Amino acid sequence: MNVIEFTPIVLATAFGAGFLGSLTGLGGGVILTPVLTLFLHVDLRYAMGASLISVIATSSGAAAAYVRDGYSSIRIGMFLEIATTLGALFGAMIATRIPTAALSVIFGLILLQAAWQSVFGHHATAPAPLDSDPIAKKLNMNGEYNTAEGVIAYGVCRVKAGFAVMFGAGTISGLLGIGSGSLKVIAMDQVMRIPFKVSTATSNFMIGVTAAASASVYLSRGWVDPGLVMPVLLGVLGGSLLGARFLAVLPVQLLRRVFAVVVGLMAVEMMLTGFHVNL
Amino acid sequence: MTKLTDVGIEQMVATLLRAGVMISGTIVLAAGAYYVIRSGTDPVHLSTFVGEPSRLRVLHEIMESAWHRQPRAAIQVGVLFLVATPVLRVILSLVAFALEGDRRYVVITAIVLAVLLFGLAEGIG
């Protein structure tokens, strides 16, 4: 295949991934990499490089909406970013030392987790009381946010555990070239008991920064191919912009379920590829 | 606790990010179009991994290649721009915390910035 044939195919695929990703919240990187590797036979490393760049784009592009809502906590985010950026550098560095077959298997497992989370994930965790973790108080992490019922104040629990999980999320992000938004939200929502809206908004801020940390390593190893990144980036941007407009109109819950099944199947396929079983 | 400077700076940051994505997208689109027009019939070799050459990996080499109108290098410039936007976001946050006199978070943000810059220096320096 040559450039003029390949580019539009990737563009269309990335557009679809961006569209579905923004509708289901499953993230573009998670969908795109398997499709690129399984159906277009792109080497996993190039696919991961392109995916990572598109993650930065969608995160930065969506940031305005999150800021407008005012739920994001920059203090919590910045503090935890120490963990995620260190994790991302670490993950990106070991990614180059791990055989791609193993990466493929790990990717499949993470995909399964994401698909599961999307369908069965529980979001309502009782928010932490205001006198929760002394570290949180010292670092001014308690905050408040607006709801229809008024202003709700929240505290933060288990800061050290949250920090550790964030390091893990950062490592996965660097290892696989994905945003790991769902892992970050789990860490904040379930480990640290930060209200869900604050967690998702803060996670959006963090995803871009974490991805930027890994991106430099990916660039240096030559995993970022401009011929691939170009249609991926443009496609994902276009798709997610369109998806944002359809959000109110389409049955998101149904989409999520269909999506989770498709992602689950791709997860299995990726793991089988990793184990050198070709279907 | 969100302070007034937080909200103001965050608005600026969001605008900056949006602008960064748009500028990056425009560069990538223009360079991409040029690339397809010029090299449309080139075969695509993405199934085998060989790694990008240094003129597409190292910052000053990318800039030089782009200057000489290498379309793939020009695309990389757009990519670099995009990677820079979250870094700029962190820098702006650092300034915001400094303006608020929040020394703890100036230090925290400085650490994050240091990790980012270290990664960039190692990666594309």
Image (cartoon, coloured by chain):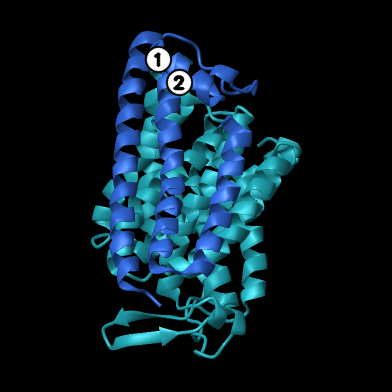
Can residue A259 be seen by looking at this rendering?
A: yes
Give A266 or B7, whichever is nearer the viewer.
B7
For badge 2, the amino acid type reads: Met
- Residue with the mark numbered 2: B63
Give A171 or A123, whichever is nearer the viewer.
A171
> Which color has been applied to chain B in this rendered view?
blue
CB within 8 Å, label 1 to label 2: yes
In the rendered image, residue A209, in percent from the top left (x then y), is placed at: 49, 51
Can residue A268 be seen by looking at this rendering?
A: no
In the rendered image, residue B55, in percent from the top left (x then y), is placed at: 54, 17
- Image quarter hosting the C terminus of chain A: top right
- In this rendering, the answer to whether B36 lies above or below A152 is above
Q: Chain of mark 2?
A: B
Q: How many marks?
A: 2
- Among the 4 quarters of the image, the one containing residue A34: top right
- In this rendering, the answer to whether A109 lies above or below A136 is above
Crowding near the residue tagged with mark 2, few <14, some 14–19, many ≥20 C-alpha atoms within 10 Å = some
Q: Which chain is cyan?
A: A
- Residue with the mark numbered 1: B67
Give B8 or A215, whichever is nearer the viewer.
B8
Residue at the spot 38% in from the left edge and 12% down from the top edge: B69
Residue at the spot 61% in from the left edge and 41% down from the top edge: B119
In the rendered image, residue A174, in percent from the top left (x then y), is placed at: 62, 47
Is disc 1 in the same subunit as disc 2? yes
Q: Chain of mark 1?
A: B
